[in-house]
Image (tube, rainbow, N blue to C red):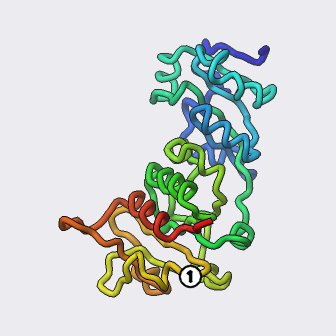
Amino acid sequence: MSNIIEITEYSAVELDMYARLNEAQLLHYYEPELGLFVTESPLVIGRALDAGYEPVSLLLEKKHVETQAKDIIERCGDVPVYAAELSVLTQMTGFQLTRGALCAMKRKELPPVKEILKDAKRVAVLESVMNPTNIGAIFRSAAALNMDAVLLTKGCSDPLYRRASRVAMGTVFQIPWTTIDDLNELKELGFKTAAMALCDDSVSIDDPELMNEEKLAIVLGTEGDGLAKSTIADCDYTVKIPMAHGVDSLNVAAASAVAFWQLGNKK
């Protein structure tokens, strides 16, 4: 493994992507070309590699070079592999690495909506969901509970942000996703839209007509405020999850899991 480089100098420009650049700066790293993102943990890195993302470099806890990161190093070919003790990495990055591994990767062009929905029956739509932890949790539920794709409005946090992809356990690399500008595009592709919202005229999530729709898009809104009123008005259904004990709502990630379980594509 001749490409192992022990870190001795924090200021090396090669480490900027791990130590000094925020995720917005990584996004624009190669501007006007597509930028970079950073993945964390061997599991997530492996799923990104499975999905065809190209690695640029690795940053590893020294003890993992010959153990749990060995397969990842081999899969990444001849990219530089920077290694250091955990205390050094924590000081560099400002957080404790999950299983002592980070990988910088090149972004890919997002596919058009029409392409990823070609054979889809159930799709999750996220409107202005800004918390990366919620994004990651929603993706994990979407992958586990039979959503065929995830669409995000441009107000959402990026699923490739390190925290989002880590919380998602790498499922952001397993379930098709892209951004969407106009929800009317879904209707043009034959989807009925279901807004998850606390409205008096809602139908229950187990409504038979809703559950039997051939193609259904489940639309979830931002933390706190929920969906925009105009979005709710434009959807074919407004859907409520029945609650007990006076609880009025669920966190968007928890609500997504309930909705995906009840309405998911039963393959």
Image quarter in which the N terminus is found: top right
Left/right of residue 109 with respect to residue 209 in the rendered view: right
Q: Position of residue 163 (x, y in %)?
A: 50, 43
Crowd around label 1: few <14 · some 14–19 · many ≥20 (10 Å) = some
Give the residue displayed 50% in from the left and 78% down from the top: 211
Q: Quadrant of residue 68?
A: top right
Q: Secondary structure at mark 1?
A: loop
Task: Looking at the picture, tell me which residue is in the foreground, 184 or 8.
Answer: 184
Q: Position of residue 265 (x, y in %)?
A: 58, 68
Image quarter in which the C terminus is found: bottom right
Q: Position of residue 179 (x, y in %)?
A: 62, 65
Give the residue displayed 65% in from the left and 24% down from the top: 69
Give the residue displayed 32% in from the left and 62% down from the top: 250
Q: Is residue 235 above or below residue 106?
A: below
The answer to whether one can see residue 9 in this image is no
The answer to whether one can see residue 27 in this image is yes
Task: Looking at the picture, tell me which residue is in the foreground, 16 or 99.
Answer: 99
Q: Amino acid at mark 1?
A: Glu
Left/right of residue 126 with respect to residue 78 in the rendered view: left
Left/right of residue 175 with respect to residue 56 in the rendered view: left
Q: Is residue 230 above or below residue 153?
A: below
Q: Is residue 9 above or below residue 126?
A: above
Q: Name the residue carrying label 1.
A: 213
Q: Quadrant of residue 21?
A: top right
Q: Position of residue 79 (x, y in %)?
A: 77, 27
Give the residue displayed 73% in from the left and 52% down from the top: 108
